[in-house]
Image: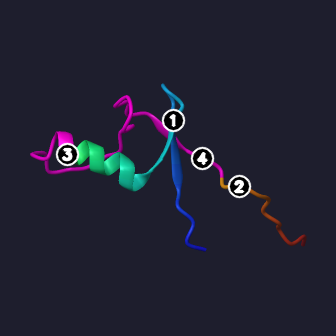
Amino acid sequence: MSEKVTYKCWRCGSEFTVEEGLETFMAKESSEGYTFLRCPYCGYRIIGKTRRPGLKYVKAI
């Protein structure tokens, strides 16, 4: 269960992983003391977590 979590940008619609978003942001501005995700393609800060593929089965009560 080591699936990579993917995120989707709300502006351009591109999908990326956490590593891609953090690497491009840290390369641009490495002087700040905190980190947050940005889209590596357009730089937009509003992103959403995508659903994982497949179905999730829940046992009935």
| Magenta residue span | 27-51
| Mark 4, other Cα within 10 Å: few <14 / some 14–19 / many ≥20 | few
Q: Residue at x 28, y 44 (%)?
A: 24
Q: Residue at x 55, y 72 (%)?
A: 2
Query: Could you tell me how far apart the alpha carbons at marks 4 and 2 are, in whole angstroms?
Result: 9 Å
Which residue in the structure is indicated by mark 2?
53
| Mark 2, other Cα within 10 Å: few <14 / some 14–19 / many ≥20 | few
Which residue in the structure is indicated by mark 3?
27
Quadrant containing the N terminus is bottom right
The numbered mark, 3 or 2, whose residue comes first in the sequence reads: 3
The numbered mark, 3 or 1, whose residue comes first in the sequence reads: 1
Foreground residue among 20 and 35: 20
Left or right relative to 7: residue 59? right
Which residue in the structure is indicated by mark 4?
50
The numbered mark, 4 or 3, whose residue comes first in the sequence reads: 3
Amino acid at dot 3:
Ala
Foreground residue among 45 and 16: 16
Q: Secondary structure at mark 2?
A: loop
Q: Are marks 4 and 2 in contact (CB under 8 Å)?
A: no
Q: Quadrant of residue 32?
A: top left
Quadrant containing the C terminus is bottom right
Residue 50 coordinates in the image, percent (x, y): 60, 47
Left or right relative to 58: residue 45? left
Query: Could you tell me how far apart the alpha carbons at marks 4 and 3 are, in whole angstroms?
Result: 25 Å
Q: Residue at x 14, y 51 (%)?
A: 33
Query: Could you tell me how far apart the alpha carbons at marks 3 and 2 are, in whole angstroms?
Result: 31 Å
Amino acid at dot 4:
Thr
Q: Which mark is residue 14?
A: 1
